[in-house]
Image (cartoon, rainbow, N blue to C red):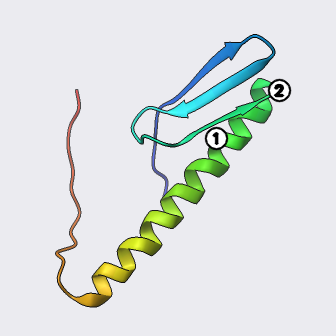
Amino acid sequence: MVREFTAIYKKNKKWYLGWIEEIPGVNTQGKTLKETKENLKEALLLILETNKFLNKKEILKGKVIKEPLSVCTE
């Protein structure tokens, strides 16, 4: 499944900063823009994997509703 997010990059002196606009806490840095982009992809995948793992525990307890949610932002 391909999902699209908005990556934002900013040069700060000798470092590049990067974060995902839609998900607080997904951020990174790197010495080059390329390194920052790679680090940000890894950070995003780790957060998505961790969130899925944590939610799976709740789902196994059987007291949640899980369903797709679609929104149009434009």
State which quadrant residue 51 falls in: bottom left
Outermost residue toward the top? 13
- For the C terminus, the quadrant is top left
Q: Give the image location of residue 57, x and y in percent.
A: 37, 82
- Marks 1 and 2 sit apart, C-alpha to C-alpha, by 13 Å
Write the residue at 42% across / 72% down: 54
Please state if 49 lies on the left or on the right of 35 as rendered. left
Residue assigned mark 1? 40
- Label 1–label 2 contact, CB within 8 A: no
Write the residue at 64% across / 41% down: 40
Query: Mark 2 is on which residue type?
Result: Lys
Tell me the crowding category of disc 2: few under 14, some 14 to 19, or many 20 or more residues within 10 angstroms, Cα based.
Answer: few
State which quadrant residue 66 falls in: bottom left
Write the residue at 56% across / 49% down: 44
Query: Mark 1 is on which residue type?
Result: Leu
State which quadrant residue 38 falls in: top right
Q: Is residue 58 above or below residue 70?
A: below
Q: Give the image location of residue 4, x and y in percent.
A: 46, 42
Please state if 25 lies on the left or on the right of 27 as rendered. left
* Secondary structure state at the residue bearing disc 1: helix
Please state if 21 lies on the left or on the right of 66 as rendered. right
Q: Is residue 41 above or below residue 28?
A: below
In this orientation, which residue lies closer to the viewer: 71 or 36?
A: 36
Residue assigned mark 2? 31
* Secondary structure state at the residue bearing disc 2: loop
